[in-house]
Structure formats: C-alpha cells, structure tokens
Image (cartoon, rainbow, N blue to C red):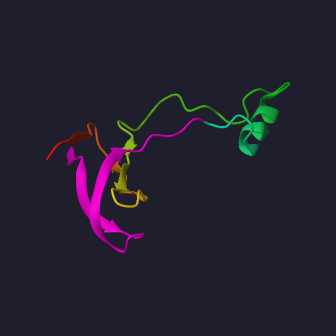
Amino acid sequence: MKMPKAAKKYCARCKKHTDHKVSIYKKGKDRKMAVSKRRYDRKKAGYGSQPKPIQHNQCKVNKKTTPLFKCKECGHGTYGAGLRLKKFELVNQ
C-alpha cells in the first residue's frame, strides 16, 4: 500500500485540521530495569528455565504496520489504525 508522506488531519491539541507528517511507528529499546524484565529474569534464573513456551511456528504472514501522524504546527503525534500489509510504502504526493 502506498501512503502519502503528508496528510491533512484533525489535531486534538490545535482543535482544527492541520498538515501532518506521516511516518511508520517503530518500537523503542526495552528498559533493562523495568519491573516486567526483572520479574522475567527472576523466573528464568535457576532450575526450570523458560517460564512460558516459545512459539516457533509463525502462523501470521505479516505484522501490523501502524502509521504515526505528527502535527506540523504543534508537534502532537497520534497513531493511525494498524494495517496488516505485506508492503507499506510512504510516497511524496
């Protein structure tokens, strides 16, 4: 799917329709000292190893791609609907 790099959308902070810059959302780096990571490491330590089974056979063909819309006036960002696509491309328009 081809999507324009710029789109006119409603900004909740500006309370009007403004130009938005479109990008693809990417997950950030995990924090090593987060509570969930510490709990997971504690469960893995010692005998017993992996607390939950690791899924090896992947049934989904592709992952959901989430577009991120950032207002050019105030910089407020909003997420679009997650789209399950094989190819997601940003094009100039």
Residue 46 falls within the magenta-colored stretch: no
Residue 11 included in the magenta stretch of the image: yes
Q: Residue at x 72, y 38 (%)?
A: 37
Question: Dividing the image into 4 quarters, which one contains the N terminus?
Answer: top left
Most foreground residue, 80 or 9: 9
Residue 29 higher or lower than 64, as above or below: above
Q: How many marks?
A: 0
Instruction: List x then y, in percent, for residue 18.
Output: 28, 65
Q: Main secondary structure of the magenta part?
A: strand
Q: Image quadrant of residue 80?
A: bottom left
Picture quadrant where residue 75 is located: bottom left
Residue drawn at x 41%, y 44% is 25
**Which percent across, then down, holds residue 62?**
35, 37
Identify the residue shown where x is 28% and y is 37%: 86
Q: Which residues are magenta?
A: 1-29
Camera-nearest residue between 49 and 76: 76
Left or right of residue 79: residue 18: left
Q: Nearer the viewer, residue 93 or 73?
A: 73
View extreme (right): residue: 46
Q: Dividing the picture into quarters, in which one does residue 54 lie?
A: top right
Instruction: Name the residue furthest front.
Output: 73
Which residue occupies the foreground of this view, 47 or 27?
27
Check the image and name the residue furthest to the bottom.
15
Residue at 82% from the left image edge and 34% from the top image edge: 42
Residue 5 image point, x, y percent: 24, 46
